[in-house]
Image: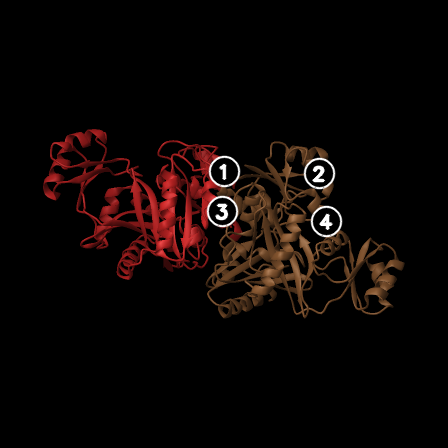
Chain colours: A red, B brown
Amino acid sequence: MHVGILGAGQLGRMLVLAGVPLGMRFRLYDRVADAPGGAVAPLVTGDFDDRRALARFARGLDVVTFDWENVPVDSTRRVAAFARVAPSPTALAVAQDRWAEKRLFSRLDIPAAPSARVDRMQDLERAARRIGLPGIVKTRRLGYDGKGQVVVRQTADLAVAWGRLQCQPSIYERMLRFRREVSLVAVRGRDGSTAFYPLAENAHRDGILSVSRAPYLSPSLQRLAEEHARRILRHLRYVGVLCVEFFVTRDGLVANEIAPRVHNSGHWTIEGAETSQFENHLRAIAGLPLGETRARGHCAMVNFVGRMPPRGELLSLPGVHLHDYCKAPRPGRKLGHATFVGRTRRERDLCADRLLRHATR
Amino acid sequence: MHVGILGAGQLGRMLVLAGVPLGMRFRLYDRVADAPGGAVAPLVTGDFDDRRALARFARGLDVVTFDWENVPVDSTRRVAAFARVAPSPTALAVAQDRWAEKRLFSRLDIPAAPSARVDRMQDLERAARRIGLPGIVKTRRLGYDGKGQVVVRQTADLAVAWGRLQCQPSIYERMLRFRREVSLVAVRGRDGSTAFYPLAENAHRDGILSVSRAPYLSPSLQRLAEEHARRILRHLRYVGVLCVEFFVTRDGLVANEIAPRVHNSGHWTIEGAETSQFENHLRAIAGLPLGETRARGHCAMVNFVGRMPPRGELLSLPGVHLHDYCKAPRPGRKLGHATFVGRTRRERDLCADRLLRHATR
């Protein structure tokens, strides 16, 4: 089985590391030659609109997937002339467009924050009046790690927000009061079988995921999240790993967004679950049986952003597992993560606190 | 940290997979271009006596290790002009020579089967008289997986055995009655710190390891095995993973042989232990703190020899992890293995039996 991955970032790298033991071979595609995945598999470089380079990449592959949700849908359609693409370009298209995502939630009866489509300043004013303040204006496309979003607290802020987002097609969304954010990593095989990981609880810092803790032990929320995710997977005839982010509010779970790929909040599964999200994504797209998703203990995953702590320090912490993406440091850039699997929640939280101190020093 | 590995077999491949998350880069050396490790790291090809190719391989590396115990000691000495070599060529030399190994055991007061050095037919006759029959004649060098050994039951067999081994320098060893074979994977860091995995119990088929089960729960044998291994590690000023194989006899533990590298009977540690033998070998040779060695449950590892069972069948067994080395099938060749980690010994043994049926079908 020869697998292609569009995007050779840390997610592509971790996919390769998970797939090699399954006997898979890989070929990667990225715009830059020093992408992290290039250390473990052959890498074709080119822009995502470079038809020739894409053809060179895709020819002879059995299946192509992506490690980046902003891969142009057109590129995946072009690649589909040479090899099966999973998840499908259609699923990718929905996840790339916040408004399409909102319509999907609404169509599938999945609770989400009230929202409206905003193409012009007038739409924004109307939306804020109808839905209420405070709210968030989010560009429909290319938002990630808190980018492409502006919080609006009063009517006077609307024009400023609209200007800051360069008048791009956007949505307006009511700002919810939530207690915490959780995410569900779900996977669907080619035969329609599904599996779900335990919910992870996520905390952010400057808009970037800082720590995930799993399992988030709430049987009722777990059941509800799985019901929602199952509807999305089925509706999109999805194949592969899909992550759904939820807010936990006073009124229950509210869907925030979906990511059509392996997800940072699922990195804990490498050491913390019976089968990692990376292996299960590959099993799914290769048409293999899905692996077990149960947690092996109480797990914490801490991101290193902008700066990697000294390796020796991290590895001297008992039970800590390091994942260094070998990327050049840059403020706000995810450079690596560490995982800890404890026997109790308390043990996990103590180690998470230590790792967070290393991460933010 | 740029790490070189002499030998790019499945052990080299698994070392790379374990080291990439630690932020290490790799360069491999092998005689053949299609060696399994070549899928995950750049590979320099050449014979082990090709000085130029060895220099091209070793230049600029921080540390060099090996994945094959029959790498010529001279090659490692040559490489040592360019980069630190760990384990040391001296340790490698001892492990390559059964007679040197026996002298080491004797010098360190580690019980071993009575044995004698055999350079000529007369030595063999004298040894058999002194030590008794039945016995095993083993070539001093290049024996593995039961190769280079002949069992001798009566005096008349001696000449036949000597002929079959082509009159090579050998040892004669009393054949012990043993209940089972166990192995200890030990690791020593550059700072002299040591760690030991739980003992594994090993069963062979046609001289080739078939299944390992760990932990082998005997606190007294564990303690004794660790004492023996600690003496060897200290004496050789060893750096890296060392495997010591023991027989469990009526009189206790008897050392059989050492392997100066990660070992097939330690493959269970990838899923079954907190830190894998591969990661700990790399931590050791890189001068990093050693990782925890405790077992995560009751683990079985089954080898696939000569033929890989269909991937889908294996992955449909709950909790089974596959390691396909992507080697061309050949009778007697190790092509892959599967691991299972159960909550109880019974659960593990049931799964081991199923895997063994797949392995031998």
Give the left or right position of residue B202, taking residue A235 as reference.
Answer: right
Residue B7 visible, this orientation? yes
Say what secondary structure mark 2 lies in. Answer: helix
* Residue depth check, mark 3 versus mark 2: number of the one nearer the observer: 2
What subunit carries mark 1? Answer: A
* Residue depth check, mark 4 versus mark 1: number of the one nearer the observer: 4
At label 1, the amino acid type is: Gly
What subunit carries mark 2? Answer: B
Query: Decide: marks 3, 1 in contact (CB < 8 A)?
Result: no
Q: Residues within 10 Å of mark 4 (few under 14, many from 20)?
A: many
Residue A67 placement (x, y as % from top left):
40, 43
Say what secondary structure mark 4 lies in. Answer: helix
Check disc 1 and report the residue beneath it.
A38
Q: Residues within 10 Å of mark 2 (few under 14, many from 20)?
A: some
Q: Nearer the viewer, residue B309 or A354?
A: A354
What separation in Å lies between label 4 and label 3 (alpha carbons)?
34 Å
At label 2, the amino acid type is: Arg
Q: Is the residue A9 above or below the residue B290 in the image? A: above
Residue B189 circle label: none
Say what secondary structure mark 3 lies in. Answer: helix
Displayed quadrant of residue A323: top left
Q: Residues within 10 Å of mark 1 (few under 14, many from 20)?
A: many
Whether labels 2 and 1 share one chain: no
Check disc 2 and report the residue beneath it.
B77
Q: Is the residue A45 above or below the residue B109 in the image? A: above
Query: Decide: marks 3, 2 in contact (CB < 8 A)?
Result: no
**Quarter of the figure that contains the C terminus of chain A:** top left
Whether labels 3 and 1 share one chain: yes
